[in-house]
Image: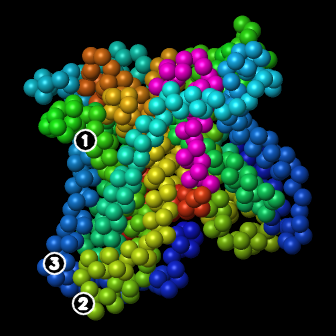
Amino acid sequence: MSSTAQELIPPEAREPAGPRAAKGGRVRRLSGRDKLVLTLMVGIPTLIELALVWLPTLMSVGLSFTRWNGLDLADIHPAGAENYQFISQDYPPFWPAVQHNMLWLLFLALIATPLGLLLAVLLDQNIRGSKIYQSIFFAPVMLSLALIGIIWQLFYQRDNGLLNFLLGTAGTPHAVDWFGDSSVNIWAAMIAATWRHAGYVMLLYLAGLKGVDPSLKEAAAIDGASAVQTFFRVVFPAMRPINIVIVVITIIESLRAFDVVYVINRGTNGLEMLSALVIQNLVGEGQVIGVGSALAVVLLVISLVPIVFYLSRTFGKENQA
Amino acid sequence: MSIAAARAAGNATTTQSRSGSRPKRHYGTHIFLVAMAVMWLIPLGWALYTALRPVASTNEHGYFSVAGDFNFDNFVQAWTQGGFATYFWNSVIITVPSVLLTLFLASLMAFAVSRVNWKFNITLLIMFTAGNLLPPQVLAAPLFEMAKHLEVPYSFSDSGNLLNTYIVVIAIHIAFQMGFCTFVLSNYMKALSADLTEAALVDGAGIWRQYREIIMPLCRPAFAALATLEVIFIYNDYFWPLLFIQSGNRLPITTAINNLQGQFLSNYNLLAAGAVITVIPTLVIYLLLQRQFVAGLTLGSSKG
């Protein structure tokens, strides 16, 4: 349990340290009425979760092996692996989308996340105005990614955007339409996403750094470790739980990247993303549910990697106990 | 970038460990932070600046200038022409029931998996947590088709099915957000002493009374943090209304701002004003409840 969670709980209500006594056998003491209450408590949320999250996930897998225009349920025809063959061989936006998702992940992992960590480490010192800086860097985290797309559109426009004025290219033939030009727009969109992601990472690491025992750092300093060594060998490994969360958030955010590109141009012309392709095949004219579902399954299989990693780290110990 | 980060991070730890009680001047750090803070504020600042200038001024002097008038006309015009009152109301209709029901259902589930010892509690908790981590687009196609093919009376929905209704958007928000809230609340409840409910059990209190009278009141701080966080999450959601709601005038504000781009065609002043209006509710929550919001985010990243 993190320090934050502990602080929120009044001391008299906290679980005392050490193994919990008399844990087993409680079920046997339940009355018939208690069993009914418990069944409802577990049953209703579980039914909602199964019906609206896990059943649709399985149906996506099923539909990806069919051909369907989405109109009549009787029109669903089995299609084998046809849809997968189509997206990998004959569907031009597929491989660019895979590349863009990878690029997005690398950009967040190598630029946005380290930037957030750097800001957290700098702000964790007792420097003047730390709270003000934190509020500024954190503000974009409150905004929706759709709104971030609009706000950056104002900044990036070719003729009236601030960036081209600052570069001195506004009104000249050299002016770049940062969101429109397919050779640069993915980079422009990733910078807009970094604006939000770095603040989020900063916040989580600030909480993590507060949880690191200061005596660890002092001990390392006494042993003659340099500052860099202290950070990477002592402080950073001590934040392991937060590091895992950050890795998972970074990967999942890059797979979920949808709102920004969809607001800009619906994920076309240089901004192809797997998530946007799913929706294009679903809501466009001449719906091809099978192809959209095959793309969704590709997205699902990739996202299962970080999800399983996270779950095994989080629940692994409890399962053994 | 990462080398710079390492070096700066190293410097930071040195300064901290050696400074002691003696105040230390961090000139380099401040220069870097000020530069970053200015870069961080530019996009929002530019939107606000553009929104405050009438289109006549920017047409005459250009957008990159300080000349001309400054007033709130764009905000008034965007509000009246853009239909913001409707969109905001739609956001309220979706957000309030979603947050309340999500927290209620998640608290039931969290209580059952954290305070009662039985066989499948970890399995169910894993299922809930994993569900929240899936990209929403993975479930989009079947959910869309389910809503489309589920016929309901026309008195209930003018589309004859669940598309274009708030019910379906609210239901999906609940299903999707419940996983996260259950995870956070169950960690929180696990940290509460087992003696609390043991004592109640001796007094003959049933499960419902343990939940309602002992655990719920103690979870108030977690509810405050989660409610703040969920209001922001659901208010900011762009995707589900985009998928399910087709009538423009039923969209919540976050999804509707996409249409403003077309509506305020090439009038960037109005578009900027619309963007700023959309920011205001989140900004108010941010200023009033920042502590709750931050507590919610860090609770979510912690592990009990």
The numbered mark 1 sits on a residue in which chain?
Answer: A
Q: Amino acid at mark 1?
A: Pro
A8 to the left or right of A127: left
Q: Quadrant of the C terminus of chain A?
A: bottom left
Cα–Cα gap, marks 2 and 1? 42 Å
Query: Which mark, by number, is residue A187?
Result: none
Residue at 34% over, 84% down: B197
Q: Which residues are magenta?
A: B259-287
Residue at 41% over, 66% down: B185
Q: Amino acid at mark 3?
A: Arg
Q: Amino acid at mark 2?
A: Gly
Residue count near mark 3 (Cα–Cα under 10 Å), binned few <14, some 14–19, many ≥20 = few
Residue count near mark 2 (Cα–Cα under 10 Å), binned few <14, some 14–19, many ≥20 = few
Q: x and y percent of residue A166 in the render?
A: 78, 23
Does the magenta run of residues contain B278? Answer: yes
Q: Which SS class for mark 2?
A: loop
Q: x and y percent of residue A6 in the render?
A: 53, 74
B236 to the left or right of B150: right
Are labels 3 and 1 assigned to the same chain? yes
Residue A180, above or below B101 = above
Task: Compare residues A267 and B47 and report the one nearer the observer.
Answer: B47
Q: Which residue is mark 3?
A: A33
Q: x and y percent of residue A313 in the render?
A: 44, 59
Q: Which SS class for mark 1?
A: helix
